Structures are given as structure tokens and as C-alpha cells.
Image: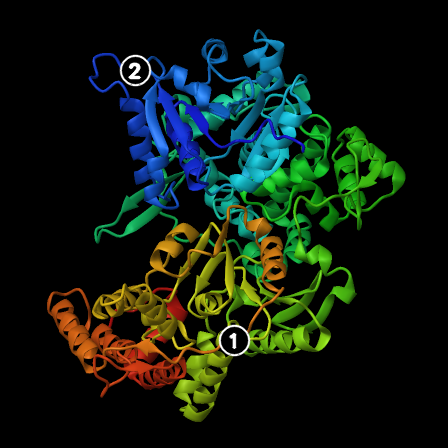
């Protein structure tokens, strides 16, 4: 049997600063016990103070560093004087100390004396070349050393740059990359051991060049951020909001360091204005409260964002800036937007072409230098900075030969990659199953993970398609229902697709069904505009039929003759949650935000969600325990519209069961769901609806009404909250007229859900809540 000498089951992080503590938290999220060490502070009686402080900082971090605060118990604090010997138990040791080469060298000398001979050793340095840190260590130590550069915050940013040195054992690189991808949930980019690695090298260059083009064209920071944000397929923080978040001083130092370490033609020279912001004004971004933007409050206490005037270096209230070019293209598909922006006229077009051409030229120049594969450069920018397309993918959108012509028209010398592309006449870097090497030679392309759109390029894999949903053959006898509407709101297309898929599984002999997709979210819930319009038109019979159909489809996830697995990720709210909790099994991304949120729009869950949570919580009671705590738990969960902050919390809340699966890497969810269908299929027996759900009847209604009265009197609930709460209580009680010992069927509770939903939908208060949510995106407290 082949052994796994580099299996990571325990880890140690040295350095409990912002990054070190956050990386320790991500290890704990993955279930890996961590030893967190830092120095001993002189004159502090607690020798582990810094490590404990790091854990507390991670617990208080917003957005949260821990997926479940209880996971902090997996981190053991310690110090480098008393606990260095404990490193002998660690399978992976990561340093995240000060960015000084001598300090890192000294640390590794100490670590080598205690680390076991199979431990993988890593640095999280963002700029110091890895080989310089360990050049004087033993050959065996150097073989087990590999850089591991996380991006902040480690829980949320997908990128992990893995940086081997020339002496890193390929088996170590393979084992650690697999650990990072599958256990920590990261997107792995193998970077070369050069200054800045991949993402920071190209990303900081982009910020430096954007500053120059902004000053040249006379645009303002907020105008630039409009042009380089979502409209261009990039993060909302765009260019200068990202700079403020990162810290202008960090960009200043990284740009200066890269300028010293790179050839003159790369030009990391900062503008005089940028230098003045850091050196004289001390405007360092969010950490000082002032950068390219400044957050203040008006006389009413409302937050107001001021923008920096680059001429006066004073802040101005420019309101919400709208750039006409952005407004004219923002509703188009990404490819159309990119083409329109690249060819636009005026100073906005001039700026965009300058920035984009700089980025294209530099990415092509870096191919083969920062990484040996083009897709690694694209993925680094997508996973590290939230871009939808990397630079090579964007050039494919525009046409590579068009970009080359524009670069030559500007008098630029083409990098070797673009020279080769020009000579070949090839229009795309990625064509079907091929891409090109950094020298322009065709080479097979291998996707970093299963990509649904790639599978669907084979038309035979799409079994049936509607505008808002598709049925896809995943292979090996498994069908997938893929929703692809805006926010994957649930309407007729989505429901019909599930019904059709169930039928096709039986007719064509498939093993089972997965419901999932690779969009931005699993599903944000029901189609509210349609529901509101039908209510306002008083189409009550049609609404009753629609809700009944919705219940039939959600419950079909459980009561079908074949296994059905839900694969939620991102938002799984309302109906999206109800579909998930009725599946035989859930394979959830760790970053799943699940909840029954209907009360926010004056409704209750009526797709079986109310029924299901009552059933689950009563099943968890021990024999002889009273029912009221289960009713109260369901009422609190639904009545407060509680949404999990992770899949781990979703399990605590009861949305995920003990046997459901949590996958750290969102990109692996559909593959794992497919495997689960195949595991469940042999000998699968169709479940039957329950007839024995215990309810409390009038006693539960009375208890909930009393609680609602207290909440309303205390100002914790509005009068209409109480109205919605009474309808919810009626369902959770099993209806009026039942006694404490009654038992009801799932069908009975579904009928009560539907009645309560329709009753509330007919009320003015609910319709006002829906209208307000659709207009503002926020709940109305009426």
C-alpha cells in the first residue's frame, strides 16, 4: 500500500498577528488542531498574551474569521520560549512573522531543531523570496519547504499561492496543494519564487498604472472606481477602494520594493500625489480613516462617504457619482460591456484603454516568469481580487489580435508571448481543450476544477433546457437540475425542471438527482414580484394552486423513488432553504448562508419549511420530554428569520443534519453531491410521509401568544410582527382544537402552511413589506 508521508492532521502557526491568527482560524474551520505561537512580551505576566490576543482578535473580526466560534477551541496558544518543542507534533508549520529576512532565517534555524522529519514547512511572506529564507538550512529541510501565501481575509479570499523553491520535493508540492484545495478550500496557484509572486506583482502594477492614468486624464477616484468595478467584471471595491482596504502604506512599500527588484521597463514608480498621501498627509486608508475616501457622519448621524480631491488633497461630498458610460452599458452581458468600455471615446475610454493595455502587456510579459501557466495568472487575479475574468480571458473577449494591434499602435514592444500569438494569428489564448504556453506553443488545457459550463459545451449533456433552468447529465447515471435565473429566484421554470428531472430519472434509468448550480448563489428564494402581483390582482385560486405545486416539488426532493441530493452554496434562503432541507442528503459549501426568512416580508415558510423544522426538533426530544421547547426553537428560528453565517452554523441551527456533508471548497460541491447520489443509489428505498408528528395544539398557541405580547410590549416586536407570529404559531401548534397529545401528518402541516401563507398575503401589512423589500432590498418593520 502506498503511504502518505505528508498527511497534515495537526498544524502550527508562528506569528499571531492579523494574518497568522486568521490563518489559524481557517485551519480550525477545517477541523485541524492548531498550535499558535508568538513571542513573550517583557513585563507581561501572561507569557502567551500575544497568541491569546490573536485568537480573540479572530473571534471579534468582522467579517467573521471563524465559521463557528466554538472552533476556536481547536487553537492552542503558546509562546516561542516555552512551547517551541511542541512543534514536534505538527505536520505543517507556517510562519507569519514580521517581514524581515533575518528574522525569518533565525526562526527557521530554531524550527529545524525541533520539527519532525516529515513536517511540511511554509512561509506566508508576501514578498520575500522563499529560497532566501532557507538557503542555509539542511537539504532535507529545504526539500520539505514550500511557500504558502494566503490573501486577507483567509476565510473569504479563495486564492492560495503555493511557491516551491528549486529544491522543494515535488511530492511535498503535490501533497500541500491537495491539502490547500480540499481541506482548506482554497484555489491553488503555483507561483514561481520571484518578487511579488503572481497576484501582488500584477495587482500592484495595475494600481500604480491606474493612478498614473487617472492623473493624466483628469478623472477622480470615485469615477475610476465606477469604471473599474463590477461594470468591468471586477470587485465592487474596484481600484482605490481596494487600495484603502489594503492600506496605502502597504502599496507604497510593496511598489517601492518591486521597483527595486524588477527591470526598469516595468515601472513601479508611484506618482508624486500618491507619495504625498503616504509620506506627508499620512492618509493610509481605512486604518487611519482617510485614504482616497473618508467615512464621516452627517448631522443626522447617517454615514457619508467623502472623496479625495487630487488637486487640493481635501475631501469633498460628491454624492453618488454616476458615470454616463457606465450607466449606458451596465445591464449588458460581461463580454459586451468589456468591448464597449475598451472602445469607448472621451477621457473615460482613454483611461480604460490605458489601464487595460498596461495590464495586458504586463500579464503577457509575466507569463513564464511569475508562473508557468497562463491560467494560473488568470486564476490569481480572479481568486485574489474578485475579478470575473483574468487578463488573458479578457484579451480573448476582445480578440487577441485586436489587442496586439492596439499595443503596437502605442509603440510598445510586444512580449515574447504576444509576438508568438501575432505570428500564429491565433485569436484566443483558450480554444476548446487547448491553451498556449508562455512561449505561445499550443498545449492541453486542464480546468482547475469541474466547471459546469465546460460540460455543457457538449450539447448532448443538456437533456432539457428552459430559460431559467436546465437538466444536465453529469455522467455515471446522475442528472443535475441547474437553476440559472437572476439570484436563482424560484418560479415556474425552476419548479418544472425539478419535476421533469424526477420523471427522466425514472424513464431513462438514472441513479438519482442533484439540485445545484455554479452561479453566484444557490437560490435567494421565491419570485416575490410574481407573488405580489397575483395577490394585488386577488388571484387567490391561482396562488393556492401555485403554493400547492411548490410544496409538491419541494417535498418530492424526499419522497421520490431515487436519491436526491441538494448542493447549496452562498445564499440558500426561503424556498432555496426548503428545497435543501427536504433532500435525502445535503452537500453544502462551507460558505452557505441558509435561512427561512419569509417573516421579513410578512409571510411564513410554506414550501414545507415550517413543517420540516417542527418535525426535526420534535424528533430530537428525548422520550418524556415536553414538546414546548421544540415548538419554541422552531418559532425562534423562523420568527427571527435567522440566517446561518456558514454551513457549520447551519448545522447548529438545524438546517443541516449530522449526516449531511460540508465541503470547504465551493468548486467541489457538485462533484461531491454526484458521489453522494451514487453512494445512496444501491438499495435505495423510497421514504413515506410521516403521520406521527406530535403537536401541542391550543396550548402551544397560547404560550406563543403570551411571548408575542411580551415582545410587543417591550418594543422587541412590532404589531405586525405579532400578526405574522400568530399565524406561524398556528402551524407549529398543529392547528387549533388539538390537545397536547395529538399527532398529525406532514400533509396536515403543509395544509396549515398554505392557509397561513394565503391569509397573510391578503393583508395590507404583508403587501407593504413585500413592496418595501422589492424597492429597497431591506425589510420593513411595520
* Label 1 Cα crowd, 10 Å radius (few <14 / some 14-19 / many 20+): many
Q: What element carries label 1?
A: loop
Asked which quadrant contains residue 283, the reply is: top left
List x then y, in percent, for residue 700.
20, 76
Mark 1 to mark 2: distance in Å? 60 Å
Labelled disc at residue 567: none
* Label 2 Cα crowd, 10 Å radius (few <14 / some 14-19 / many 20+): some
Question: In the rendered image of this protein, does residue 226 appear above or below residue 244?
Answer: below
Q: Mark 1 points at which residue?
A: 559
Q: Is residue 496 left or right of residue 15?
A: right
Query: Observer-nearest residue: 84 or 412?
Result: 84
List x then y, in percent, for residue 732.
29, 76
Q: Counting residues from the N terminus, which is met first, the one under dot 1 or under dot 2?
A: 2
Q: What element carries label 2?
A: loop
- Nearer the camera: disc 1 or disc 2: 1
Query: Observer-nearest residue: 300 or 262?
Result: 262
Question: In the rendered image of this protein, does residue 83 appear above or below residue 770?
Answer: above
Question: In the rendered image of this protein, does residue 143 appear above or below residue 215?
Answer: above
Q: In this view, does 371 lie to the left or right of 421?
A: left
Q: Mark 2 points at which residue?
A: 40
Question: In the rendered image of this protein, does residue 657 appear above or below residue 780?
Answer: above
Q: Which residue lies furthest to the right in this view?
A: 424
- Residues at circles 1 and 2 in contact by the CB criterion of under 8 Å: no
**Quarter containing the C terminus:** bottom left
Q: Is residue 701 left or right of residue 774?
A: left
List x then y, in percent, for residue 277.
41, 27
Asked which quadrant contains residue 395, the reply is: top right
**Quarter containing the N terminus:** top right
Q: In this view, does 9 lie to the left or right of 468?
A: left
Amino acid at each position: 500500500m502506498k503511504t502518505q508521508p505528508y498527511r497534515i492532521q495537526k498544524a502550527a502557526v508562528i506569528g499571531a498577528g492579523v494574518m497568522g491568527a486568521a490563518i489559524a482560524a481557517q485551519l480550525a474551520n477545517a477541523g485541524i488542531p492548531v498550535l499558535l505561537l508568538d513571542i513573550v512580551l517583557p513585563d507581561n505576566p501572561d507569557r502567551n498574551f500575544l497568541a491569546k490576543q490573536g485568537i480573540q482578535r479572530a473571534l471579534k473580526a468582522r467579517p467573521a474569521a471563524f465559521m463557528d466560534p466554538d472552533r476556536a477551541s481547536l487553537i492552542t496558544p503558546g509562546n516561542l520560549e516555552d512551547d517551541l518543542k511542541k512543534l514536534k507534533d505538527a505536520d505543517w508549520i507556517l510562519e507569519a512573522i514580521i517581514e524581515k529576512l533575518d528574522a525569518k532565517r533565525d526562526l527557521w534555524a530554531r524550527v529545524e531543531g525541533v520539527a519532525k522529519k516529515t513536517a511540511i514547512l511554509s512561509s506566508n511572506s508576501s514578498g520575500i523570496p522563499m529560497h532566501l529564507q532557507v538557503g542555509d538550512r539542511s537539504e532535507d529541510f529545504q526539500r520539505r519547504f514550500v511557500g504558502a501565501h494566503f490573501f486577507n481575509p483567509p476565510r473569504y479570499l479563495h486564492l492560495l499561492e503555493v511557491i516551491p523553491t528549486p529544491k522543494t520535493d515535488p511530492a511535498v508540492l503535490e501533497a500541500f496543494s491537495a491539502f490547500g484545495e480540499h481541506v482548506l478550500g482554497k484555489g491553488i496557484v503555483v507561483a514561481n519564487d520571484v518578487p511579488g509572486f503572481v497576484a501582488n506583482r500584477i495587482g500592484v502594477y495595475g494600481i500604480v498604472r491606474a493612478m498614473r492614468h487617472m492623473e493624466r486624464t483628469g478623472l477622480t477616484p470615485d469615477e475610476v472606481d465606477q469604471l473599474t468595478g463590477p461594470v468591468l467584471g471586477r470587485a465592487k471595491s474596484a481600484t482605490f477602494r481596494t487600495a484603502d482596504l489594503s492600506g496605502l502604506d502597504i502599496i507604497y512599500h510593496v511598489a517601492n520594493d518591486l521597483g527595486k527588484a524588477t527591470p526598469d521597463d516595468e515601472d513601479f514608480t508611484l506618482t508624486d500625489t500618491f507619495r504625498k498621501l503616504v509620506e506627508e498627509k499620512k492618509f493610509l486608508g481605512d486604518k487611519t480613516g482617510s485614504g482616497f475616501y473618508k467615512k464621516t457622519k452627517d448631522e443626522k448621524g447617517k454615514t457619508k462617504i467623502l472623496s479625495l480631491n487630487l488637486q487640493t488633497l481635501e475631501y469633498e461630498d460628491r454624492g453618488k457619482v454616476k458615470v454616463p458610460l457606465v450607466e449606458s452599458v451596465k445591464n449588458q452581458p460581461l463580454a459586451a460591456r468589456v468591448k464597449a468600455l475598451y472602445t469607448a471615446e472621451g477621457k473615460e475610454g482613454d483611461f480604460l484603454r490605458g489601464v487595460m493595455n498596461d495590464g495586458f502587456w504586463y500579464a503577457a510579459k509575466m507569463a513564464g516568469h511569475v508562473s508557468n501557466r497562463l491560467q494560473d495568472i488568470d486564476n490569481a487575479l480572479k481568486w485574489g481580487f474578485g475579478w470575473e475574468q483574468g487578463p488573458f480571458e479578457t484579451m480573448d473577449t476582445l480578440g487577441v489580435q485586436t489587442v496586439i494591434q492596439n499595443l503596437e499602435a502605442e509603440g510598445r514592444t510586444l512580449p515574447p508571448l504576444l509576438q508568438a500569438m501575432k505570428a500564429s494569428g491565433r485569436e484566443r489564448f483558450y480554444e476548446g481543450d487547448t491553451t498556449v504556453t508562455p512561449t505561445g506553443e499550443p498545449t492541453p488545457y486542464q480546468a482547475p476544477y469541474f466547471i459546469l459550463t465546460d460540460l455543457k459545451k457538449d450539447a448532448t449533456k443538456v437533456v432539457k433546457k428552459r430559460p431559467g433552468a436546465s437538466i444536465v447529465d453529469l455522467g455515471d447515471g446522475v442528472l443535475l437540475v441547474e437553476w440559472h435565473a437572476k439570484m436563482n429566484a424560484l418560479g415556474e421554470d425552476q419548479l418544472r425542471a425539478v419535476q421533469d428531472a424526477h420523471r427522466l430519472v425514472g424513464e431513462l434509468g438514472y441513479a438519482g438527482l442533484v439540485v445545484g448550480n455554479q452561479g453566484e448563489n444557490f437560490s435567494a428564494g421565491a419570485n416575490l414580484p410574481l407573488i405580489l402581483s397575483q395577490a394585488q390582482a386577488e388571484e387567490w385560486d391561482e396562488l393556492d394552486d401555485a403554493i400547492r405545486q411548490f410544496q409538491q416539488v419541494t417535498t418530492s426532493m424526499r419522497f421520490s423513488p431515487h436519491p436526491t441530493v441538494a448542493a447549496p452554496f452562498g445564499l440558500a434562503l426561503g424556498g432555496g432553504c426548503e428545497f435543501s432541507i427536504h433532500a435525502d442528503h445535503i452537500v453544502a459549501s462551507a460558505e452557505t448562508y441558509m435561512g427561512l426568512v419569509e417573516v421579513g416580508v410578512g409571510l411564513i415558510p410554506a414550501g414545507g419549511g415550517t413543517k420540516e423544522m417542527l418535525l426535526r426538533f420534535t424528533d430530537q426530544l428525548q422520550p418524556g420530554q415536553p414538546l414546548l421547547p421544540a415548538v419554541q426553537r422552531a418559532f425562534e428560528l423562523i420568527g427571527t428569520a435567522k440566517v446561518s453565517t456558514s454551513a457549520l452554523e447551519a448545522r447548529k441551527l438545524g438546517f443541516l443534519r449530522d449526516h449531511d456533508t460540508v465541503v470547504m471548497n465551493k468548486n467541489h460541491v457538485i462533484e461531491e453531491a454526484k458521489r453522494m447520489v451514487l453512494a445512496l443509489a444501491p438499495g435505495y428505498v423510497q421514504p413515506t410521509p410521516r403521520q406521527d408528528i406530535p403537536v401541542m395544539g391550543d396550548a402551544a398557541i397560547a404560550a406563543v401568544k403570551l411571548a408575542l405580547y411580551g415582545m410587543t410590549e417591550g418594543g422587541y416586536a412590532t404589531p405586525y410582527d405579532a400578526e405574522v407570529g400568530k399565524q406561524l404559531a398556528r402551524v407549529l401548534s398543529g392547528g387549533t382544537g388539538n390537545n397536547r397529545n395529538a399527532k398529525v401528518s406532514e400533509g396536515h402541516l403543509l395544509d396549515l402552511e398554505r392557509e397561513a401563507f394565503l391569509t397573510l398575503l391578503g393583508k395590507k401589512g404583508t403587501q407593504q413589506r413585500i413592496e418595501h423589500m422589492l424597492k429597497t432590498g431591506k425589510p420593513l418593520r411595520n
